[in-house]
Image (tube, rainbow, N blue to C red):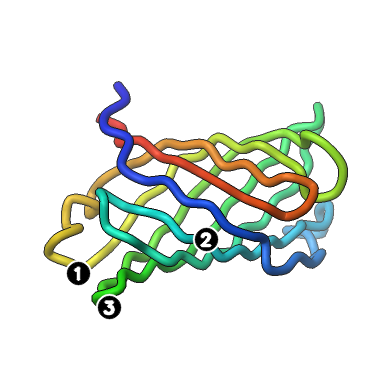
Amino acid sequence: MLGEKFTQAQGKVTGTRVIPGIDGGPPLVETSFHVQGKVYGVDVTDIGTYTSRMVPGGTLVGEGQGVSMTPDGDSIVWKGFGVGKPTGRGLAAQYRYSMSFQTTSQKLSKLNGLLAVGEWEVDENGNCKGQGWEWK
């Protein structure tokens, strides 16, 4: 069951490159981004990188990791997995993802042990945005 919407962010893709596939498979597209947003109402700056690959049927499969920082210096480490589809030219895609977190922040401690689900979108100009909900 979906719980509270606890995060949202928007920003820009900062880089892309093609890297070798896993075990000789098709190449992966690596995408890095920088976004500003909120987690449980706390301002964060987030940087992350994910890789995606096209699988039969035109589906994108991706996984990534990143770090979010609050203005007070608290940090959040996250890892995620998602599936998506291309939506236009270039980088344009939509993903649905799951994500887990680790933090030592007292005010954000409810992230520890939380599984989140969410939406991530990138347009053909490299603008990106996302939002996430608690999975209960």
> Under tag 2, what secondary structure?
strand
Task: Return the x and y of residue 132 as percentages of the image width and height.
Answer: 40, 40
Residue type highlighted by circle 2: Val
Residue 64 vs 104, above or below: the answer is above
Identify the residue position indicated by label 3 in the image.
73
**Label drawn at residue 19:** none
Quarter of the image where one finds residue 27: bottom right
Residue 11 vs 14, above or below: the answer is above
> Under tag 3, what secondary structure?
loop
Task: Return the x and y of residue 86 as percentages of the image width and height.
Answer: 77, 36
Among numbered discs 2 and 1, the one appearing first in the sequence: 2
Residue 40 vs 96, above or below: the answer is below
* Residue density around tag 2, few if under 14, some if 14–19, many if 20 or more, within 10 Å: many
Which residue is painted at 78% across and 52% down in the image? Answer: 125
**Label drawn at residue 104:** 1
Quarter of the image where one finds residue 109: bottom left
Q: Nearer the viewer, mark 3 or mark 1?
A: 3
Q: Which quadrant is the C terminus positioned in? A: top left
Q: How far apart are labels 3 and 1 at the CA level?
A: 11 Å
Residue type highlighted by circle 1: Thr
> How many dots with numbers?
3
Residue type highlighted by circle 3: Gly
Which residue is painted at 78% across and 42% down in the image? Answer: 54
Task: Return the x and y of residue 103 as percentages of the image width and height.
Answer: 25, 65
Which residue is painted at 46% across and 64% down in the image? Answer: 46
* Residue density around tag 3, few if under 14, some if 14–19, many if 20 or more, within 10 Å: few
Among numbered discs 3 and 1, the one appearing first in the sequence: 3
Q: Going by the picture, which residue comes out furthest to the top?
A: 1
Q: Nearer the viewer, mark 2 or mark 1?
A: 2
> Under tag 1, what secondary structure?
loop
Q: How far apart are labels 2 and 1 at the CA level?
A: 21 Å
Identify the residue position indicated by label 2 in the image.
35
